[in-house]
Amino acid sequence: MRPFYQPTVKKVWLFWIAGAMWSGGGLMLCSLAYGWLAEMHSSAGVWIGLSGTLLALIAYRYGFSKIARKNIDRLHSLLERASLFAFMPLKSYLLVAVMMALGMALRHSPLPRPYLAEVYATIGGALFLSSIHYYRSIWKMVKE
């Protein structure tokens, strides 16, 4: 018998939840970065934004996409119905909590917002781009 605190869902929902988490986190970080850069009212904001975008592409290519693909492979290996909380590995919950705490600490630090904007744009862009892998997997699952 499964405990009440561990609801199960069809595997495809785990892909939707993971994709939404990656997309949502990425869009939130990019939105914060955009807001900080828009406050600059100068061409420097454009250059910092472009730099963050380029760094996001690099972070996506060499880091975040590999993490997403590894998680997608793990999700495919699950049973057809799995725990609602299985959309990411257990150890990732701790990593996400640490990263959220670090992000909040940075937002409340005396660091200049343009520097934070570049970091937020980099991570946010890489997260959003990597979320596309989840949606492709859903598309393939639906087609089959």
Image (spheres, rainbow, N blue to C red):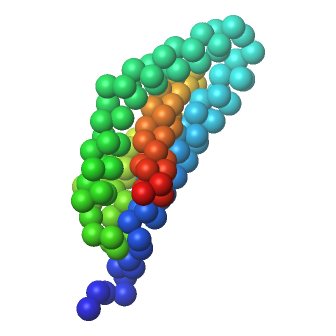
Q: Which residue is most to the bottom?
A: 1
Image location (x, y in percent) of residue 65? 36, 35
Which part of the image, by quadrant, shows the C terminus? bottom left
Instruction: Establish if 53 lies above or below 82.
Output: above
Q: Nearer the viewer, residue 120 or 108?
A: 120
> Is residue 32 shown left or right of residue 108?
right
Which part of the image, by quadrant, shows the N terminus? bottom left
Q: Nearer the viewer, residue 44 or 113?
A: 44
The number of numbered badges drawn on the structure is: 0
Q: Residue at x 51, y 20 (%)?
A: 52
State the image quarter where residue 99 is shown. Answer: top left
Image location (x, y in percent) of residue 121? 53, 28
Q: Which residue is most to the front?
A: 144
- Tell me if I can see residue 19 in this picture: no
- Tell me if I can see residue 130 in this picture: yes
Instruction: Establish if 4 lies above or below 29.
Output: below
Image location (x, y in percent) of residue 79? 27, 69
Q: Nearer the viewer, residue 89 or 33?
A: 89
Q: Residue at x 31, y 87 (%)?
A: 3
Q: Nearer the viewer, residue 36 or 110?
A: 36
Q: Residue at x 43, y 62 (%)?
A: 12
Instruction: Establish if 88 lies above or below 103.
Output: below
Q: Residue at x 64, y 14 (%)?
A: 45
> Is residue 99 shown left or right of residue 53?
left
Image location (x, y in percent) of residue 30? 58, 33
